[in-house]
Amino acid sequence: MSNLKQCPIEKAFDHVGKKWGINIIRDLFLGKKRFRDFLAANPELSTKMLSSRLRELERKGIIEKRIAQKSPLLIEYHLTDKGRKLRPVLYSLAVYAVQECPKEIIASNASAADAMREIKAAFG
């Protein structure tokens, strides 16, 4: 990789891989749009950290903030074209996890096939 200034994989993870960033992007693909939705989906995520990550993802052009309603103020977050390009990446990572770490991620009452159907519905 002598022709590259930086490893592209490292740069990609730097772009989206900070703690909670991937979770927020995943949640947007799953239909979550509001601040409270992200908090509910990630109970260990603090409001301060969520605010920081949302600003960072917005600054990097992966998400955009929209005012859905002015009174009372209602803000929603949406993936940009740049953010939506992460769909096949997240799909591949999820498939990898199901195949290589099934005991760690698949619920005891589910099968790998069930997990794959869920992943395809979200990212496929």
Image (cartoon, helix red, strand yellow):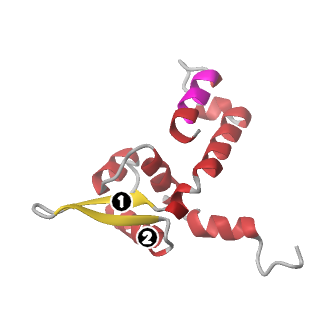
From the image, tell me which residue sits under label 2.
Answer: 58
Look at the numbered disc 2 and give the secondary structure of its residue.
helix
Q: Name the residue located 69 percent from the left edge and 36 percent from the top edge.
A: 101
Visible residue check, residue 19: no
From the image, tell me which residue sits under label 1.
Answer: 77
Look at the numbered disc 1 and give the secondary structure of its residue.
strand
Amino acid type, residue under disc 1 in the picture = Tyr
Q: Nearer the viewer, residue 1 or 46?
A: 1
Q: Nearer the viewer, residue 96 or 58?
A: 58
Against 32, is 82 above or below? below
First in sequence: mark 1 or mark 2? 2
> Residue 105 location, x and y as percent?
59, 34
Against 122, is 65 above or below? below
Visible residue check, residue 32: yes
Is the residue marked by circle 1 packed among few (<14), some (14-19), or many (20+) residues within 10 Å? some
> Dominant secondary structure of the magenta stretch?
helix
Q: Quadrant of residue 2 in the image? A: bottom right
Mark drawn on residue 56:
none
Q: Which residue in the rendered view is the most extreme toward the left?
A: 71
> Residue 112 location, x and y as percent?
64, 24
Q: Quadrant of residue 108 in the image? A: top right
In the image, residue 118 lies in the stretch drawn in magenta: yes
Q: Quadrant of the N terminus?
A: bottom right
Verify CB contact (< 8 Å) between mark 1 and mark 2.
Answer: yes
Q: Which residues are magenta?
A: 113-119
> Residue 97 location, x and y as percent?
67, 39
Q: Quadrant of the C terminus?
A: top right
Residue 25 horizontal side relative to residue 54, left or right: right
Q: Name the residue located 47 percent from the left edge and 62 percent from the top edge.
A: 80
Residue 34 horizontal side relative to residue 44, left or right: left
> Residue 73 location, x and y as percent?
16, 63
